[in-house]
Image (cartoon, helix red, strand yellow):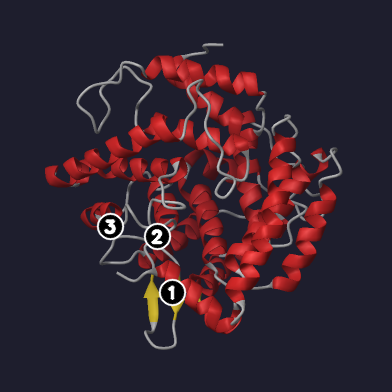
Amino acid sequence: MTNFDQLISDQFCAFDADYLTQKAAFEAQFEPLQERLIAIQKTGNSMAASDQKMVECKWLLLYTADWNTLTDKLSDFEKSLADRDQDWASQQVESDGSWGPCYDQWFLKVDAMIDAVNTLADAGDAPKYPFLFLEPIATPQKMVAWLESQKTSQIYADGLDRRDALGAVTATLSQMCFKSEIRDYFKAHVKGFDLTDDYIATYKNWLDAWQEDQTGYWGGWFATKSDGVLKSPDLSLTFHNISYQHGKVDLWTEIFATTLAIRDDAYPFGWKHNGDFNNHNNYDVTKIFDLGWSKVDVTSQKAASADIAKIVNWCLTKSMTPDGGFIDDPTFYNSVGAAYYYGVSFLDQAQYFGTDKPFWADAPFADGPALCCKIQKKIKSEGLDDDEAKAAMEKLVDACGNCT
């Protein structure tokens, strides 16, 4: 199997011979700024503007070799940390109906929009302004053209890995088209964008054609000078395509085999980050297995059960503190709340908190309900109140009641 991490690095080096040195230097500038932001967020301030600037800096660092733009963005990010009044940056923009006013990249605004729409849908509130910013994908033809323009990266030629943009927009489209409450919300409340049945069918057809026959996975494609176009098995993109379609996809035997085979590889082409497991990826893997459990044979189920047991043990012993906290990893998560959200989501998906037998294990976990309450208490004591921490608390309350 192709080592896509190495392939991507080699392609960036082909574009910029000084790529690795430049990237390391910019990482050294970025990381202290991110740590300062996280320290402020721990006080309960979401710092919405600074958070958006941080996300875009991280994207520039990981997916481009655009050092001039990154230089300017890092300076802007640093200056923003002095301003603690940033609630305005979480509001919808009147001029085009977007969210994420501090983002320059359009796909990041799309990503911010779908988060906001989920919140609005839960509250039963309509957006204030029409979604004019979705013009690049406003019709089935425009949508397919945009997706095709992002599916294949040619990093050696332009210094741009399109994988993150492709993943953000397909995850958004999958929620719009397949998540019933979001689909209904768009049809009932969103102006400036027409989510028709034809639009949904066109997207579904494109998505099915994108799935790779041998692996069952979805992922970015990479054009090379010598080996043609290579198709990556991307855990995150595959998870979104399976999850939002509620498991109604083909090639489950191949999906299980690929998921098991990439366990020790690096995200997004495997489960691990910096050489170890990660609760975000643990959640994705476990939900993939859950959705396809009835579609595969006993041998595949046993192999998956063994690996779920490994990552549950890792979560409990390596990612958590004794008092029910989750250890943040700023090299992966964008906020402390995110570390809690994905830790809780993984244990909830593994059915650890419940009193019924999990889909992958022989018996329920005796300490599950008590741990659920301990995590609730820790979130309260830390004063975490960003959207992801709140979502984590909602999952905990659903699992074991309000313990606090």
Alpha carbons under labels 3 and 1: distance apart: 19 Å
Q: Amino acid at mark 3?
A: Thr
Between 98 and 13, which is closer to the camera in this rendering?
A: 13
| Left or right of residue 365: residue 149 | right
Q: Earlier in the sequence, mark 3 or mark 1?
A: 1
The quarter in which the C terminus is drawn is: top right
Label number found at residue 7 = 1
Residue 242: assigned label: none
Q: Reading the chain from its start, which is encountered first: label 2 or label 1?
A: 1
216 displayed left or right of 373: left
Amino acid of disc 2? Phe
Q: Residues within 10 Å of mark 2 (few under 14, many from 20)?
A: many
Instruction: Please identify, in this view, whether the residue under mark 3 or under mark 1 is nearer the observer.
Output: 1
In the image, residue 310 sits, relative to residue 114, either above or below, namely: above
Residue at left offset 63%, top offset 60%: 59
- Label 1: state its secondary structure: helix
**Alpha carbon of mark 3 to alpha carbon of mark 2: how far?**
10 Å
Foreground: 31 or 221?
Answer: 31
Q: Which residue is mark 2?
A: 269
Q: Earlier in the sequence, mark 3 or mark 2?
A: 3
Residues packed near mark 3 inside 10 Å, few (<14), some (14 to 19) or many (20 plus):
some
Which residue does the numbered mark 3 point to in the structure image? Answer: 258
- As helix, strand or loop, the secondary structure at mark 3 comes to helix
Label 2 sits on a secondary structure element that is loop
Q: Is residue 120 above or below residue 224?
A: above
In the rendering, at what x and y percent does residue 340 appear? 54, 32
Gap in angstroms between the C-alphas marked 2 and 1: 12 Å
In which quadrant will I find the N terminus? Answer: bottom left
In the image, residue 311 lies at what x, y percent?
Answer: 34, 39
